[in-house]
Amino acid sequence: MTMAVASENEMSAPAPKSSAPAQDERARLGFRLTLPAQILVLFISAFPLLMQAYISLTDWSPLSGTNWWNAWEMWNTFANYTDLAMDGRFWSALWRTLVVMLVCVPVEFLLGLALATLFADDFPGKKLFYSILLMPMMVVPAVAGYMFFMLFQSGGPVNDVLSGLLGFPVAIAWLSDPKLALAAVMIADIWQWTPLMFLILLAGLVGVPQDQIKAATLLGANAWQRFVTIVVPKMKTIIIIALAIRVIENFKIFDTLYIMTGGGPGVATETISVYIYKVTTQDLIWGYVAAIALAILVVLSVAAVLAMKRMAANREAAA
Amino acid sequence: MKRAVPFEIFRYAAIFAALAVTLIPILWMMSMAFKPIGEWSATGAELTWWPKEPTLANFRFIFGESSSDLIVALDRTALKPILSSLLSASLGTIIAMSAGTAAAYGLSRFGAGQNLPLALTQLRLFPPMAVMIPVMIMWAFLNFTDSWWGLALIYGIVTLPFAFWLMKTFFDDMPREIEEAGLVEGCSRWRVFTRITLPMMRAPLASAALFVFILNWSDYLIALLLTTREWVTIPVYMASLSSSMTGQLYGAKAALGLIAAVPPVIMGIAIQRHLVRGLTFGALKQ
């Protein structure tokens, strides 16, 4: 970060834009400015990935008494990867992660869209309500997890409210029932991240041209028709971005969930991140963890590149 | 467009329902933070929505005052975890913002680092859990494990994509005429950047820095893996409060949770305008 400072003196005075020295200065400064970021990216990608690939082909563990570079002594070729293909706990964790995603993201999207629609025009109190509704996404996720841990205690407020509504005492042990625990975890995620959908979708909604809506209204389109034929098509890109962000982030789900249930009871709420965390810190088979992690990275990278190509193609088609 | 009265009633009803759902978990934790142990209601005691006898005992407890009601004494107070969170999140923000701002300017003005947008987007895509094995080994090798500066380095890298994208959109939006005037006046491009562009961008820089700070401050997983004792951060420390012999220290944890939650919420409200931009990597502006 201080690297660029030294270059101040060598910089020559400006010359007409097209001249060679000016081009040279631009290129040199551009290179220096981007260098720190390039180094950080390289530092966290190239070497770690090579190391990860190497370790993933061995049985190495921090307890095996040798340094990681000597892991070849425990070479097992592709045994970790074949183990992974047969690892029932891994596949069920992956499945659970997808279930959580397939429930949470659509619910967050629909609730966020509904709220955004309510906020599309002005009304008294809008600004204050808007600020309050955004609060959950700023709460530290681990703290949000603790909030919901307290709410879902058997003597906690959720059961208290249910008792009040139903008229008889309810004492559901939310977090120790395998099915309910997963539901509780999803409720926490929906609470925390619906505001993000609301925020993004509202920003998109106010960008929809009002004159088109007015024209449609004059032509006799009702609110639903206007929404489907004008608003949704105009918001297509924004909707894709919002969904993509939540899909990416939801796939990583860890903090709230781990504080609430620790992945339990049993493995009832064990998602991919929790599973990897447990193998890393409890079983300590790091060679195997490296194989899991690398497999996930490769799949996600391919998916990301394909998705970005697709989006770029769409953008060109639209332009 | 004037809306019908029934719609307004429906709108307010729906919004108030949403507000209630939003606020109850937060208020419950606040209420818990000020409750004496007798009202924690985890042990079957009557549930009280509002503390009957509000007390600061929970806050005093996490800062080291021994409590006769709790048979436990903390082996360390919340002071050092708070310090650790502050230091690591701040230095992490400085790293991300310096590297991110410089790179964003380099790309926005000089077309340097064309690979960065994709590389940094991928960096955000990956679950941190999937790169933590090499990071843990590297950090151990560098002697960075269990230190606030080690955390700061990884925070700086993890939040670099956000700093980069936010600053890039700000630079892209900025009118070039002023910079060009500076060049005509005879300033070098570096001088234009440091003396004209950056001072002009003070407000966006501050917003981006707050945004990045919130992200760093919110981390739990990385600190859980990279700190063990000396420099655990607030969330890690908070989670460890539950494993003591007396069971959950509800009030104490709630007090600590409140301390952890308040700064980012205030900062987040302060930079509301830029949240959309930061979260969508500049694909969307408000």
Image: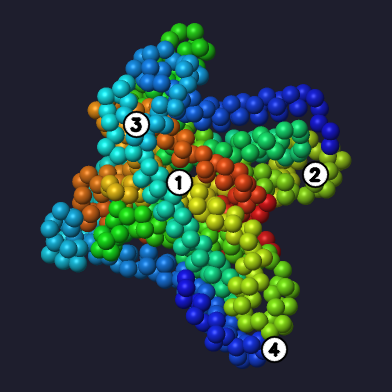
Disc 3 marks which residue?
Answer: B65
Disc 1 marks which residue?
Answer: B218
Marks 4 and 2: which is nearer the front? 4
Marks 1 and 2: which is nearer the front? 1
- Secondary element under disc 1, as helix, strand or loop, is loop
Instruction: Identify the image quadrant of residue A82.
Output: bottom left
* C-alpha gap between disc 1 and disc 4: 48 Å
Marks 1 and 3: which is nearer the front? 3
* Closer-to-camera residue (A145/A182): A145
Tell whether B137 sits left or right of B189.
left
Disc 4 marks which residue?
Answer: A16
* C-alpha gap between disc 3 and disc 4: 70 Å
- Secondary element under disc 4, as helix, strand or loop, is loop
Q: Assess whether mark 3 and mark 1 are in contact (beta carbons under 8 angstroms).
A: no
Mark 4 nearby-residue class (10 Å; few <14, some 14–19, many ≥20): few
Q: Amino acid at mark 2?
A: Ile
* Residue A131 % position (x, y): 63, 39
* Residue A2 % position (x, y): 47, 73
